Image (tube, rainbow, N blue to C red):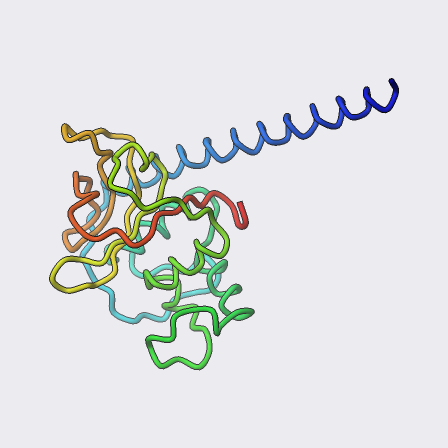
Amino acid sequence: MHQFSVCKIVMKFFLLLLFAFTVQADNLANGLVAAATERLNHFVVYDGSYQKIAYPMGDVDENKGVCTDVIIRSYRALGIDLQQLVHEDMKAHFADYPQLWGLKKPDSNIDHRRVPNLETYFRRHGKVLPITDRPHDYQPGDLVTWRLNGTNLPHIGIVSDQLASSGNYKIIHNIGLGPQINDMLFNHKIVGHFKFTTPNN
């Protein structure tokens, strides 16, 4: 009887812990959407040129940026520094990251600003979600990556909490005209779908 009571207590503890983690993840996803929505108020010229920046918590000029900078700046508003997280992971596991730029070691100035590197980091430390053609599978706070039609260039955005008339949640992203929100979830080939709240969540 005593052993059964202990098992019940342990089970309740784990259920409470699971609930706490779920609430924390939901709160962070909501915070990410709010932070990304705030980015829509900023004037940003699309500029992906290489720039020397501080480390950690470094950023390019606030009036410059690309699609990845929407993600980086939104997470940074929540106290999560993707520059540092990606750099430290690349230092420890450089061979696991795409070898597309002829580098022999990580570069904290640019690595986190490249979509393929963020995809790799989120696969390694976030939650990989299914890629489908069903709108309801893409929820606010999710991260989506695409390869753009015609150019096959990589792109990334955050699923917002605003529903379009199509039934899709609108996407917050920068595809060339600064941070914007529109209904483009299925306009290009989706290649990545992630949830990232904390490392190894």
| Residue 164 sits above or below residue 201 on the image | above
**Residue 138 as seen in the image, left or right of residue 129:** left
Question: What residue lies at 52% left-to-right and 70% top-to-bottom?
Answer: 91
Q: Residue furthest right?
A: 2
Question: What residue lies at 49% left-to-right and 57% top-to-bottom?
Answer: 124
| Residue 19 sits above or below residue 78 on the image | above
Question: What residue lies at 29% left-to-right and 39% top-to-bottom?
Answer: 159
Quadrant of the drawing holding the N terminus: top right
**Quadrant assignment, res 149:** bottom left
Disc tally is: 0
Where is residue 61? Give x, y as percent.
29, 59
Q: Residue furthest left?
A: 150
**Quadrant assignment, res 34:** top left
Q: Nearer the viewer, residue 20 or 87?
A: 20
Q: Nearer the viewer, residue 126 or 189?
A: 189
**Residue 200 as seen in the image, left or right of residue 75:** right
Where is residue 64? Give x, y as percent.
24, 58
Where is residue 74? Give x, y as percent.
36, 45
Q: Nearer the viewer, residue 48 or 104?
A: 104
